[in-house]
Amino acid sequence: MKVKGRIVPIATPLAEHEYVNEVQLRRLVDYLIGKGVHGFWANGGFGGQTYLRDEQQVRAVRIVVDQTRRRVPVLAGISDTSVTRVLDKASRISSCGPDGLFLLITPYDSLTNSQVIAYYEDVAEHVDLPLYIYNNPWATHHAMDSDTIIRLGHHPNIVGIKDSSENPYLFVALAEHFRGSDFTLLAGTMPLDCFALSLGFDGVIDPTDQIYTDLAVAQFEAAQAGDWARAFSIQHRLDKIGRLLMNLGDYRAGMEACMAMLGLCERIRPRPFPAIEDPATLAQLRAVLIDARILPSQEPILVSPR
């Protein structure tokens, strides 16, 4: 199965004591599928893998898979700090029924390229589901090069990659090598989304798809139709919210505030991370949503940020 389209790194709404808010998560799944997204990237860094208890990570994946009801594919995160811990988590996550697994290398050690290869190949040989590479130098402090990714891409159970490297030269190298193959290329860097699609990438994974869903889906459809003028025009609009969120210094807090304004969920950030309470910052975010016609100018906030 080759995954294509806008694959949403779905947030995990939180309830009291940082348990998964099942009602809000199920509602979010249905909302996004109704908007036309093509799949979910569950239990990633944005979805809670970096801070939720292990059992809550498993529960979040189980809820997403159950609520999706096979309408779109679900790729689930198994990242942890060692191969042993990864395989233990993989066993529990796989029992939830996702379509594939994805893995970020441990962020606590500076791995060599040969160690990265060994890490992924060891996991790939011991899991039953297809495995996706997650290249995110910001999180791991290790930037995979094209040779490493290409080597891993020829393992029979490593079927794709989400690349968040912000490296256009790497994107070009991967597109050229894997063109026409069954290996899935997914871009995870907002400013390069449309560029990646123009190279032949299969899809995009971007957290802001949860608030700019209509535009995100429209961009992919325009790219599929070869309407690059429209696709890049949409990219310009998507970049507006991206730049604002990055300039806040706390991307996830900005996303939390936007999702609350849209009534999607109340809380996605754990202790000790505070919600945005500054009226001027909230007004900035609201203005961007109104400008994009996502939030009507007179619409009250449906769910207040915590």
Image (cartoon, rainbow, N blue to C red):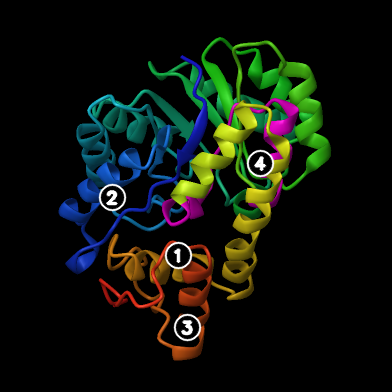
Gap in angstroms between the C-alphas marked 3 and 1: 14 Å
Q: Give the range drawn in magenta.
A: 190-212
Labelled disc at residue 54: none
Q: For mark 3, what is the residue?
A: 283
Gap in angstroms between the C-alphas marked 3 and 4: 28 Å
Mark 1 falls on what kind of element?
helix
Mark 4 falls on what kind of element?
helix
Q: Earlier in the sequence, mark 4 or mark 1?
A: 4
Amino acid identity at mark 3: Ala
> Seen in the image, is 178 located left or right of residue 209?
right
**Counting other residues with Cα less than 10 Å from the Cα at mark 2, is it few (<14), some (14-19), or many (20 or more)?**
many
Foreground disc of the pair 2, 4: 4
Q: For mark 4, what is the residue?
A: 231
Gap in angstroms between the C-alphas marked 2 and 3: 24 Å
Location of the C terminus by quadrant is: bottom left
Q: Earlier in the sequence, mark 2 or mark 3?
A: 2
Position of residue 162 measured from the top left corner of the image (x, y, whole percent): 58, 35
Residue 252 versus residue 109 in the image, above or below: below
Amino acid identity at mark 4: Ala
Q: For mark 2, what is the residue?
A: 28
**Front residue of this view, candidates 238 and 99:** 238
Residue lying farthest to the right in this orientation: 169
Image point 20% across, 57% down: which residue?
A: 21
Residues at circles 2 and 4 in contact by the CB criterion of under 8 Å: no
